[in-house]
Amino acid sequence: MFDLSWEIVAMQMIFGLALGCVYVLMAGGLSIIFGLLDVVNFAHGTFYMLGAYAIFVAVSLCGNFWLGLVSAVVIVALVGGVIEWLLLKPLYKRDPLYPLLLTFGVSICIPDIIKICFGLIGKVVPYPSGLMGAYMWGPVMIPKYRLFIIVLTLVVLISLWLFLNKSNLGMIIRASTRDSLMTQVLGINVSRIWTIGFMIGIGLAALAGAVAAPMVASIPDMGVEMTIECFVVVVIGGLGSLGGAIIGGLLIGQVISFVALFAPSWSNVAIFMVMAIILIIRPRGLFGEEGRL
Amino acid sequence: MKRTYWFGVLLSLSILVFSMGSAMADGARLGIVVPLTGPYGTYAEEMKRGCEIAAAEINATGGVLGKPVEIITRDSELNAGIALRRFKEMVQEDGIKTIGGTLSGGISTVVNEWACKNKALYMTFCHTSFPLGKENCGYGFTTGIIPYMSGVAVAKYSFENLGKTWMNISADYRWGHDELAAWLVTSDKMGGKFLGNIYTPLGTRDFSAYIPQIMAKKPDILVLSLFGTDLTSAIKQFAEMGLSKRLKIVCPKTAMAIAKECGAAYDENVYGAVTWYWTVQDYYPKARKFVNAYMKLYKTPPDADADSGYVATMALFEAMRKAGTVDDVDKLIETLEGQVWQYNKGPEGFRPCDHARTSSVFVVQGKGAKAEGWDVFKVISEVPYWQTLESCENNAKDYPYGQVKLPGK
């Protein structure tokens, strides 16, 4: 066993925070989609994977990580919008099982399409220049790229809050979440709002995939486990609660980081144990209040 | 009357088709089960392609006993239960006597045990421990080497050239444990100093949590007994932190696909072991035939898993030719035990006592940003089998590696 010094604890917290931020982006997107559309998006991890491949393609074409990052989010969000418009929208009036099954089908089809187009071997997305290595704060190492992920997530969350709470469109999205029928009666094209909301949710998943791409093996099946873990985060935070998704994501990031320190074999299982404990104490999750953004 | 006539025609045609099928089924068949879906699909696809290229080569030279050979492929989905079910279907329903595949060493030992009970000849393509101890029951052959062989090969090189203090990250299953055991034994013999081990569950994506521990211990060598996406993620994340500049990373099993996925991160500070690599065709010209055939079909060079599938299939069908039978398993076993071949590297064969492949191991070094196309490794050493494969007596007792007390286990 090694010496547990404060430097190691500090570094584990930083790594856990960065990992948690990826979960926050994923779970935030899933919460928005569920809160707005009542759709459990089983393909959420697939869009995470698409984000990774989109940034790979974009960076290969333009050679610039930042341009690639923005392009990846926009492109995958547009793909999500098309899928919602063409495939999901006709199913809203039917049994809730239908959209769920559709997203499950999408989660199988798209990875197979990616395998055909790109092959089975993962793609390389290089770290942006200037973000390799780490800052040293005394004996504590603060990896530059992880710091970037933390800062980026903070910026995205603040932007999202401002959008949802201070803009007219955000107000309409929140209104549609609370009562879509009343919003429609007031003359708002709710169908278009749903598409926009879905695109925002997918855009967040794509952003998570794009920032994760330099760190992990970017393969067609990379979204499978991410979908499961994302659902755990959302359940912990409370279905449909964006605030809950944030807290849940950060909590899970720390859990994985510290369990890996003491009992690495349990790091994958630990998140499910945390979910079980929280659900026993509070069955609706930490901030569970369906439909709330 | 007319109805009876057409019924008779249909019946006759059916009998004809079935009898043709039966006649085709008399030809040599190898039924393989590999995890085509799932995280190791890349490597499973390599194995399948290697088998198919070998079969095509055999058929181009007249097949076996005048009939074309056939590869029948099923997907195991990296699940032991599914793999066994697929093998059972092939052996018990389709009448196939010679089976091959799996990519997981753990699954291969389960399949080997089943093959022994059901008297099927089993060729495994992956690293496996079934030639050891009680698991060796006589019906299995491996073209994938015993895990400790690659561990010993690369450990010896490391302690001679890279340093003495080492730390290990092990995938927490049989193969990872076997590699750790190989390193512990070699370290004892060569004056290495073991600083600690971390077991990680299969499918770990984030290795950054382990970096503070590694930095605190300051090893010369970090051994990554990982494979597939786990290994890719680990190397990329350690490169991100600049870890590969502070120490040497050594992988007891690596692959061309992993180096390709890591890109510049798989640089000259990353070493690994492979049973074969395509550029060895420069000094083993016989390998060019296989490499060219593969590249013509798939536009990429083959990797070690493809070689493993190819060698197993060639050895099996050539044994069928020599033995003059496609389904007398005992005769085929006897023939394979005495067989020596030279396909893609130097002479090798299956050792009669335990059916282990007498394979050399190549120690390779990454090229990082200097890699061109698929030339991602520099081959720095070929370790012959007599420097890594234990004697028959030792393998029968699973000694010494099976006797090692692993940390935390």
Image (cartoon, coloured by chain):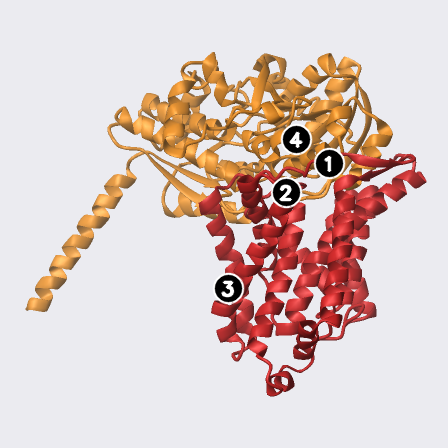
Identified by mark 3, the residue type is: Val
Tell me the colour chain B is drawn in. orange
Q: Are marks 1 and 3 on the same chain?
A: yes
Image-quadrant location for residue B354: top right
Image height of A149 relative to A278, above or below: above
Image height of A274 relative to B247, above or below: below
Residue annotated with mark 1: A130
Q: Are marks 2 and 1 on the same chain?
A: yes
The residue lying at 91 percent from left, 34 percent from top is A139
Please tell me which of labels 1 and 3 falls first in the chain.
3
Residue annotated with mark 4: B265
**Are there few (<14), some (14-19), or many (20+) residues within 10 Å of tag 3?**
some
The residue lying at 63 percent from left, 24 percent from top is B272
Instruction: State the separation of the CA atoms marked 4 and 3.
Output: 36 Å
Find numbered disc 2 in the image and state the secondary structure of the residue it sits on: helix
Image height of A27 relative to B217, above or below: below
Q: Chain of mark 4?
A: B
Residue annotated with mark 2: A65
Instruction: State the separation of the CA atoms marked 4 and 2.
Output: 17 Å
Q: Quadrant of the C terminus of chain B?
A: top right
Identified by mark 2, the residue type is: Phe
**Are there few (<14), some (14-19), or many (20+) residues within 10 Å of tag 1?**
few
